[in-house]
Image (cartoon, rainbow, N blue to C red):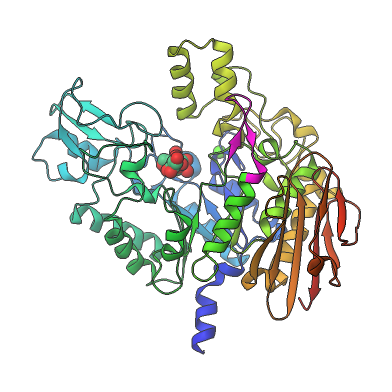
Amino acid sequence: MTQHEKRAEDSWWKNAVGYQIYPRSFKDSNADGIGDIDGIRQKLPYLKDLGVDFLWLNPIYKSPNVDNGYDISDYEDIQEEFGTLDEFKEFLKEAHGYGIKVIMDLVVNHTSDQHPWFLESKQSKDNPYRDYYLWEDATPERLPNDWQSFFGGSTWTYDETTKQVYFHVFAKEQPDLNWKNAKMREEIYDMIRWWLDFGIDGFRLDAISHIQKEPWDFKIKDNPWAPFMNVSGIETYMEELRAIFKEYNIMTVGEASGVTSRKAAFWTGEDDGYIDMIFELEHNHRMGLPGEEVGDPLGFKKTIARWQKDLSNQGWNALYIENHDNPRSVSVWGDNSPKSSKALATAYMLLRGTPFIYQGQEIGMTNYPFSSIEEVDAKDSHSQYNGLLEEGKSVEEALKITTHWTRDHSRTPMQWDDSEGSGFTEGTPWLAINPNKAEINVKSEEQEKLSTLNYYKQLIHLRKTTSVLINGTFELLLSKHPQVFAYLRKDEEAEVFVLVNLSKDAVQIDLPTRVSSEKWQEVLTNDHTKKVEKRMSLSGFEAHVYMKGAK
Ligand code: TEU
Ligand code: CA
């Protein structure tokens, strides 16, 4: 094998399309209302048919479920409601049989407060596990600083046993690990090797940019999260992680907020990058008042274009428009219509990077019509709601603001068919099923030629059979246009022109002559076929993909 071939094989993920599974809500195989590993196994033929190459599973480890699996109490075992380690092994084998790889969530910024390390750590100041976490002298009235956690409230929680406080950037049940402690790091590294030796194909690194913190007396200026966002000194830990990852032919994707697009080029650089790609969290621009916010298309396209540009010579993007932490893209950026689903898909899936599809996105699943706070499960939404009530907002207002952007919109069960349990469960689902399951479901979309699902299949196929889409350059067109996202992907042999109206309104555009005068062939549209011309009119959410040259 030549050096070049070796490198191409090592970066299999550049040519791949990923699919994110939120196991709780994907497929329940035993009627307890909770999705599970065997359910995912049963759906492998569906995933194969869709055309995806790898799956990212949200956490399935042992967990008290304060933050749905992101509070881990045993890294090397499976949550009972999801199945057993043997079942997971069987699933992994079957997935590999289909040619589908599997990556797992790696949650190492924090553990659960029920993890044996923390239970020990709490015992006494001289417990061998004390320094696995971050403890400080303080009283509930006089905390070490006034830093706020992502889930609301102080980052410090007082513990009676030893009369000290411990640090957490998320919920108090998610104490942060002390990365300065080399012994703790070694245990984490052993765990990572354990999973890689088990045969998984990589990791999504949860909240990885938070593992290093500023000194406790650091003064916050404007950004309240600055004390634990990509803080200098993190490099050492990332280098250690890289050394382990390099031993295996795997892929790694980091959720690394606070790592700028410029720094991301280094973080994901081919030779000495820490990880293979990054999920940026910056493109999620909103506009409007709380409770009525929608996505801002201009902010979206500007941010995306900046990440494309800054990672053009070095580094790699992870592309996504949905995940388990955000409302449904078709409700935020689109108008809930299949046409807008397709437009959004066209806009991001042909960019430079590895595209991820979040479960249900491929059928155009929408936000859920929440009508009471009891219907919401997400911890952060409850604390937001209570905070709003304390501020003096009415129940109605608090509910509107909280449910408008809650991450539970994306966590309602997968809509496989129009039956009572939507083909997700034979029992009572842990989170309510969206009433629009009658119109939006896999079964009916499989039969309907022009469905969102079939459009996704075409896009995935196009993406994987068109080499210019992998390594070709990116050039933004009509950069100032507030609604239209238009770009070119180019290499020596071919060129692709992507044209999407990101708004519900009809628009008109004037293309540069060098683009309009070329001989384009249309390869995909969510509307009627249209010729490229200097002046073009596009209806709301109209999208086209054109190509010239060899595939
Ligand atoms: O989310 C983390 C997350 O969104 C923050 O790290 C982010 O950097 C910050 O909010 C930016 O403003 C991950 C998971 O995706 C989420 O589901 C978990 O609840 C969380 O980590 C805790 O593990
Ligand atoms: Ca189940």
Q: Nearer the viewer, residue 142 or 417?
A: 142
Q: Nearer the viewer, residue 57 or 252?
A: 252
Q: Residue furthest bottom?
A: 2
Q: Is residue 96 left or right of residue 111?
A: right
What is the x, y in percent for residue 444? 82, 43
> Magenta span covers which residues?
285-298
Quadrant that contains the C terminus: bottom right
- Is residue 19 visible in the rendered image? The answer is no
**Residue 289 magenta-highlighted:** yes
Name the residue: 54% across, 39% down. Answer: 24
Name the residue: 48% across, 57% down. Answer: 261
Q: Nearer the viewer, residue 486 or 447?
A: 486
Quadrant in which residue 172 is drawn: top left
What is the x, y in percent for residue 364? 73, 42
Q: Is residue 249 left or right of residue 510?
A: left
The vertical placement of 422 against 275, above or below, is above
What is the x, y in percent for residue 237? 29, 59
**Residue 310 magenta-highlighted:** no
